[in-house]
Each structure stands twice: as C-alpha cells, then as structure tokens.
Image (cartoon, helix red, strand yellow):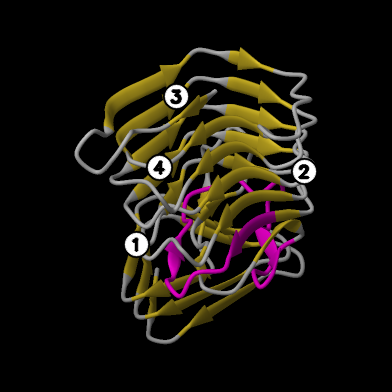
Amino acid sequence: ITMWGNSPSVTANNINIHDNVIHDITNPALAEGIAITIHATNVTVTKNIITGPFSTAGIYTSQGMDGPATITDNTVTGASAYGILLKSPFAQTVTGNTVSGATVGIQVNATSITAPTINLNRISGNTTGLNNLSANTVDATSNWWGAADGPGPVGPGSGDKVSTNVTYSPWYSDATMTHLTYSTIEGDLIVDGTLTVVPGVTLTINGTLTINGTGTVGTNAHLIIGGQLEM
C-alpha cells in the first residue's frame, strides 16, 4: 500500500490505513508493506499485519511528508531490512507495535529532524532493535526488548540492540508488559510495596530511596544510591 499527495497544496490528509493483512511482497520497485510518501500529512497506520519477506520496510515514512504520522498496534515480522523505517521530518508516534525478525526492527534516519516517540512496543528477535541515525535523542522508554535485563549493547541487557542517542530506561522486563525496570532514576524514589532489581541489572538512584515495604536485589544485580536509603 503506497500513498502520496499531489503537491503541498493538494495533500493526502487525514488518512487512516487500518486492519490490512499484507504478505508475499515480491515487487522490487514497491518493496514496502505500507509506504507513506510525499505530501502526506496526519496519517495513521494501525492494526495491520505485515509479514515478510520484503526488501525494504514493513512500514515506511518518507522525508517528503508534509505532516505527522502515527503508527500504532501493528504487527511487522520477517523484514530482511527494516521493520519500521522512519524518515519523515515531522512528528512520528510509534506505539503498541510488535516488531520481530528484522535486520533492524526500527530505524530513525537522519532526515527525522523532529525526534519520534517510540513507546509501549514489543521489539524482539531482531538483529538490532532500534537504530538512531538522527541528531536527536529518541524517547524509546517503556518498551519490551526481548529480555528481562533490557536492551544491549549500549543498554545493560541481552535483549535487542539499541544504538546511541536512545533513551531506553525504563523498559518492560516481561513480554506481557506489566513490570517496568529502571536503570537510572534522577531524583527521589518512594516505593509503596516491593522494589525488585532483577538479575543482571544495575539500578542507580541519584536521590533518596524510600521503601515502604520490601526490597530484593537479584543475583549479579546492583543497587546504587546517590543519596539516602530509608526503609
């Protein structure tokens, strides 16, 4: 599925691409599952299932877009290159997607001069989970990276890899996305219940930690407190 507008004054505006099942893409000239190209604005791509192989991307936004895009609740598997490829210079919201089996799960290109937000996604089983080539720091907090100890190698974990200029903490430590794990907390933290540092994770709190309950630090895990501990 490829969409575009005719000109800056005749845009493809307020488009919703939803509930499609796309597979067996063999045309080398149109190698994306869903491509949002020139003069498109206010586009939502939601609840699509896109299965590879395809040579470019499952979902693609072009640097020629004229406005924002929202990519939500899609499933993209088996991309030989990119699960989701973001090139648009406008706001891009990527949330609730499942991206797996790609060389790069999500790539942010240098042309994305407005930093996209990438939250609440399941990004696992890719060679690289998120690669940021832009000059911005990308908000990729609250995602599942395929491992309880989070992403690597910039991150502390054994999950999908993330590049530099990516904010990945906190991340979900389970595929059902019910438990958030932090690596660094700037400021004070008050826990009304149980604080658990899962194995392999170092939690740094640059403030006062107050636990109104119990605290557990797993094997090969570390808790670093830059202020006071109150229990």
Q: Which of marks 3 and 1 is nearer the N terminus?
A: 3
Mark 4: which amino acid?
Ile
Which tag, 2 or 4, sits closer to the chain's start? 4
Residue 18 location, quadrant? top left
Tell me whether the residue at label 3 lies in contact with that at label 4, contact meaning CB atoms closer than 8 angstroms: no
Q: Is residue 91 magenta?
A: no
Within-10-Å neighbours for mark 4: few <14, some 14–19, many 20+: many
User: What secondary structure is found at the residue carrying circle 1?
Assistant: loop
* Disc 2 versus disc 4: nearer the observer: 4
Query: Cα distance, mark 1 to mark 4?
Result: 17 Å
Q: Does the magenta stretch include residue 141?
A: yes
Residue 104 location (% of width, % of height):
71, 51
Type of amino acid under label 3:
Thr
Which label belongs to residue 125? 2
Whether residue 145 is situated above or below residue 97 in the rendered picture: below
Q: How far apart are marks 1 and 2 (CA)?
A: 27 Å
The percent position of residue 84, horizontal first and vertical second, equals 59, 43
- Callout 2: helix, strand or loop? loop
Q: Residue 114 carries which label?
A: 1
Instruction: Please name the amino acid that badge 1 sits on.
Output: Thr
Q: Which of marks 3 and 4 is nearer the N terminus?
A: 4
Crowd rating for badge 2 (residues with CA inside 10 Å; few <14, some 14–19, many 20+): many
Q: What element carries label 3?
A: strand
Residue at image location 54% in from the left, 20% down from the top: 48
- Highlighted range, magenta: 129-157
Tag 4 residue: 38
Q: Mark 3 points at which residue?
A: 46
How many numbered marks are there? 4
Q: What residue type is labelled 2?
A: Gly
x and y, in percent, of residue 103 in the image: 77, 49
Disc nearest the viewer among 3 and 4 = 4
Q: Name the secondary structure under disc 4.
A: loop
